[in-house]
Image: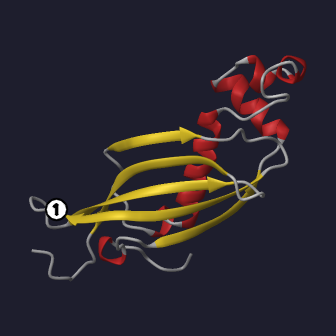
Amino acid sequence: MSQQWYFEDFYEGQEIDLGQRLVTDEEIIAFARQFDPQPFHIDREAAAASIYGGVIASGWHTCSMMMRMVVDGLMCSASSMGSPGLDGVRWLQPVRGGDTLAVRYLTTKVKASNSRPDRGVVWSKWTATNQRGEVVCTVEGMGMFGRRPGGNNA
């Protein structure tokens, strides 16, 4: 994305497509071995016998993949100042090797800071869908963004 994003560029109802990403069994297992070693994430036989019928990605892996897509597709070219936190994460469908995730960023609210005129807060909802159009994960939260330089930000 070649555009430089500042707080003023966000508006309620805005949707930003952040592209797609193929998920592999190997990365699911590697992530889970390090961060979430439950049997249905790391052991093919145990996963096959589980309620999931096979290896699935950790929800935290799904969130990490979404975060990477948000960074690559938006934050690397934005005046991001970080985030004070998330309000909600929902894992709605399992993510499996061979799935292709697509992520959309929806701006739900914007508010310029009253106490710090150099920034504003953007509330957003990220939605990941698989290749069948099923919503697999949603993340709701907020981020701080710098105001456009030279603008009347007072």
Instruction: Tell me where residue 143 sits by quadrant.
Output: bottom left
Seen in the image, is 9 located left or right of residue 130?
left
Seen in the image, is 35 located left or right of residue 100?
left
Residue 77, how many percent across, how many down? 47, 69
Quarter of the figure with the N terminus: bottom right
Residue 144, how many percent across, how many down? 31, 57
Residue 79, how many percent across, how many down? 36, 66
The residue to which callout 1 is attached is: 113
Quarter of the figure with the C terminus: bottom left
Instruction: Say which residue appears at 35% left-offset and 42% top-offset.
Output: 85
Residue 27, how many percent across, how many down? 77, 38
Q: Camera-side residue: 51 or 120?
A: 51
Tell me the amino acid under the disc marked 1. Ser
Instruction: Say which residue appears at 53% left-offset and 58% top-offset.
Output: 71
Seen in the image, is 133 located left or right of residue 26?
left
- Helix, strand or loop at label 1? It is loop
